[in-house]
Amino acid sequence: MLFNACDVIEGPYLENPEIIDPGDDDIPRNVLILEFTGHTCKSCPKAHRTIDQLEELYGDRIVPVAFHTGYFARTYSGDKFHTDFRTEQGAEMEKYFEFAVFPIGMVGNLDKGRQSSYSSWPSEASVIIDQESPVILLTSSEYDTSSGEIEVTVGLINKSALEGDVQLAVYLVEDNIISWQKDEDRDPIDVEDYEHQHVFRTSAGSVWGDGLSESDCSANANVQLKKYMLMDPAWIPENCTVVTILYENVSREVIQCTSEKLLK
């Protein structure tokens, strides 16, 4: 079976009668933070802690994804830094964005020209957090323990038309992974029991997602789609979260994003 399909659902639909009709209520825009990091990057924990602080401040309005890629994500033989967090999707991201420094990231966009340091993430997030989104984004996941298949149902409820070339991407991230990390603020600098959060594991098809049809983007549309991913036996399902990202492909601006625990 291929795990990169995106299908229109005939039924059953996501059920949440309280929000199926957005009416005149504002739909708050959540804040996607794409973080590019590595376990031998001694400055990267500063970025990790910045995300922790933003989550404490804004809760689940912050949607972080950490790609471990590049030089600082290389593995080594022996007792330290042997965990391989790298993925093909992360390598594709690194090739596209052409990072010059680590840590680096993007807040509310996937634009290679808007890369920013963790020091600016709080101010960038504070701008987005007060903005509205034209769409309610819902997700519901089913995990088959025997096959490892994850079936994600994505619901789009458009308050107004979605303009441009709209893409939908679905990721799986894992929290609470204990492994080595360099941290220049710790003594010793090599931390054995570092807790890695929001680690990108896989995507449903391309890391860039799939395009939506014109009808999917029309005003008042109520769209149901299915996406598929495959769980690796080494990952812990209880620690995994499904991240859904809706963005415009020309401006690279995120329209809306959500994160939902795989198992509730």
Image (cartoon, grey):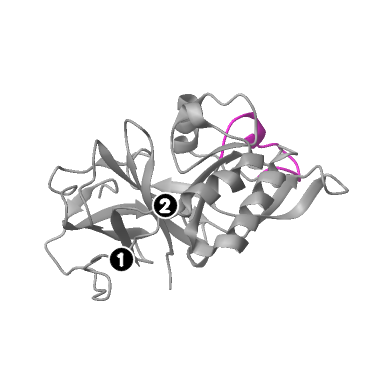
The answer to whether residue 220 shows anywhere in this view is yes
Q: Is residue 24 left or right of residue 126?
A: left
The residue lying furthest to the bottom in this view is 17
Where disc 1 sits, the SS reads loop
Instruction: Residue type at mark 2: give it.
Output: Gln
- Label 1 vs label 2: CA separation? 13 Å
Region rendered in magenta: 68-82
Q: Is residue 69 left or right of residue 257?
A: right
Whole-percent x, y for residue 33 in the image: 52, 46
Query: Decide: marks 1, 2 in contact (CB < 8 A)?
Result: no
Comparing 111 with 151, the one in front is 111
Mark 1 surroundings within 10 Å by alpha-carbon count, few (fewer than 14), some (14 through 19), many (20 or more):
few
Residue 162 colored in magenta in the image: no
Q: Please give the residue where the numbered disc 2 appears in the rendered image.
A: 131
Q: What main secondary structure does the magenta stretch of the protein show? A: loop
Whole-percent x, y for residue 84 in the image: 60, 42
Question: What residue sits 22% from the left and 69% below the top?
Answer: 20
Whole-percent x, y for residue 159 in the image: 23, 57
Question: What residue sits 55% from the left and 44% below the top?
Answer: 124
Q: Please give the residue where the numbered disc 1 appears in the rendered image.
A: 25
Where disc 2 sits, the SS reads loop
State which quarter of the image contains the C terminus.
Answer: bottom left
Residue 75 colored in magenta in the image: yes
Instruction: Residue type at mark 1: give it.
Output: Asp
Q: In this view, does 250 lie to the left or right of 82?
A: left
Whole-percent x, y for residue 252 in the image: 38, 35
In the rendered image of this protein, does residue 106 appear above or below residue 126? Answer: above
- Indicate which disc residue 47 carries: none
Comparing 83 with 78, the one in front is 83
Q: Who comes first in sequence, dot 1 or dot 2?
A: 1
Mark 2 surroundings within 10 Å by alpha-carbon count, few (fewer than 14), some (14 through 19), many (20 or more):
few
The answer to whether residue 244 shows anywhere in this view is no
